[in-house]
Amino acid sequence: MIWLTLVSLLCSVLAAMVLVPVVRFLARRVGLVDAPDEERKLHREPIALCGGVAVFASLLVGFVCTILYDRSYGDFSLGYVTSQWYGLVFAATAILVVGLIDDAWVMRGRQKLLLQILIISALVGSGTVVEKIGLLGFEVHLGSLAFPVTVLWLLIAVNALNLIDGADGVATTAGCFISLGLAVLSLTHGTPLGCIFAFCLAGSLIGFLFFNKPPATIFLGDAGSMVIGLLVGVLSVWGSVKGSTLLASAPIAILAVPLFDSLAAIARRWLTGRSIYAADRAHLHHLLQKKYGQFGMLFIVAALCSLTTVLAIASAYYSMPWLALLGMFLAGAFLVVTRSFGHAECQLVMMKASHMTRSFFITPQQSSLEKNHRCLPLQGNGDWNLIWEPLVDFAQIHNLAKISIDLNLSWLHEGYHASWSDVRMPERDNQVQVKWPIVIAVGPNKNSVNIGMLHVVASVTSPNIHERIADLSMRLADLEPQIQMIIAELERQHATPAEVQVTGAVSARRYASADRGTEPAALMPGRH
């Protein structure tokens, strides 16, 4: 088996080294490149996409070569390739095509999500089903929930890898460690074909990393990151326990790092009232790169993936599932305690839980006097309290039930969320709710840019409520010069010496790109 693993790694690495330059050349010739923008993408010149095509092709080359080697020179230890493997290759090819279409023409998030669900449902219908869930030695049989739970798990895996793919080499590095971990896990549980397939995936990613490391000359694209996510998701199901489809703590722990990023993104957007498709620069790779630099970011990702993978494998080998959970906890704790990632999201969760708990125990007399008030800079150092404090004063004077603001200036790495509300809100049927997009005219052409949202709730019994809301609209307009002043100061802090000489043009371009920015993938993936 050792020789087969070496053959699989060697063949897939060599195939990637040959195929990646060819695919890169063809992508450039047909114009399938990722153009930079000033809002979310970190590169400065067009980079070829379609790296996923080279990775998938080199994976198949390595897999076929290893099977042929086993049949010609080995002892047929891999056995026959069953129909489930053909189903996996078909589903991965379909996902690849969807990703290529999105890379070329940019699909809407809901369109791509629908296609992902259809492809994954067909794969699950062919026999890849999670029949029971095992965690810390306890097993729960899913019964009729097996199908939807499996579809949900594979959707999470697909979009978790897609979401983390936003900086040079990040998804490739994470995918290498995840694949190697799943290979060892498959070997431990006696699924040799799954082990070889995972080693081939790891080898193709290692070969691709030579071209995807900073500064990258080719990106995986959505096609590549989604295919990798689907493959590791399926392997985590097939390789958990021999002869079973048990989704255990070990494979989940191996996928911990991309799952952290996905969970944090969902929590951040849900708790701040943003759209799930909203673009920002608060992902794991954005924050790590800003704090540690490009290669420091890759080192942190590699170290965390190594930690979770080693402990996950140890938990399976020694039948100690708590080791896998320990790896997940240590990785998450490192990111949060060092304020590298997830600290703001944890604060949002704690404040939400605190306010909810408080509402159950406060007396009616106290609830009419006390308020819930939170201010949280999600990212950056802009002095947004200059905008928020006058709005709170207005809410207090006019007896509003709630006022909240959420700012997202992704091209400046700025995010701010604040909320002021009654401890006990009016019943929903007795609420007046208004949401204002905060639109600012910027640049020499006075382009209108949406930088956030203002949410107001008032009781229908409040006198002259419509006049008060109209007054708030005027108050917000009065604050526009201060908002522009803060943005201008942040622009100066972020500008390079060359940009300082053309500040007006740079600002106009950045604002225009921010106004166009939309997230094409189901859960806001990167484009690398």
Image: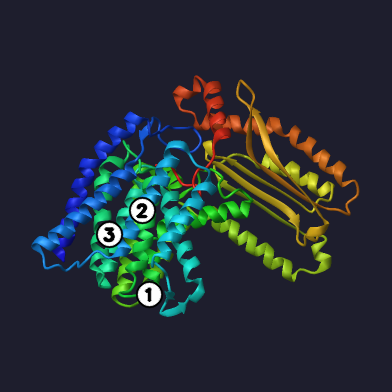
The residue closer to the viewer here, 287 or 205, is 205
Marks 3 and 2, the one that precedes in the sequence: 2
Q: What whole-number distance in Å separates the C-alpha atoms at marks 3 and 1?
A: 22 Å
* Helix, strand or loop at mark 3: helix
Camera-near label (3 vs 2) is 2
Q: In the image, which disc is placed on residue 92?
A: 2
* Helix, strand or loop at mark 1: loop
Q: Going by the picture, which residue comes out furthest to the left?
A: 73
The residue closer to the viewer here, 186 or 421, is 186
Q: Quadrant of the N terminus?
A: bottom left
Say few, some or many: other residues with alpha carbon within 10 Å of mark 1 (under 14 / 14 to 19 / 20 or more): many
The residue that disc 1 covers is 321
- Say above or below: 285 vs 145: above
User: What's the amino acid at mark 2?
Assistant: Ala
Q: Quadrant of the C terminus?
A: top left
Camera-near label (3 vs 1) is 3
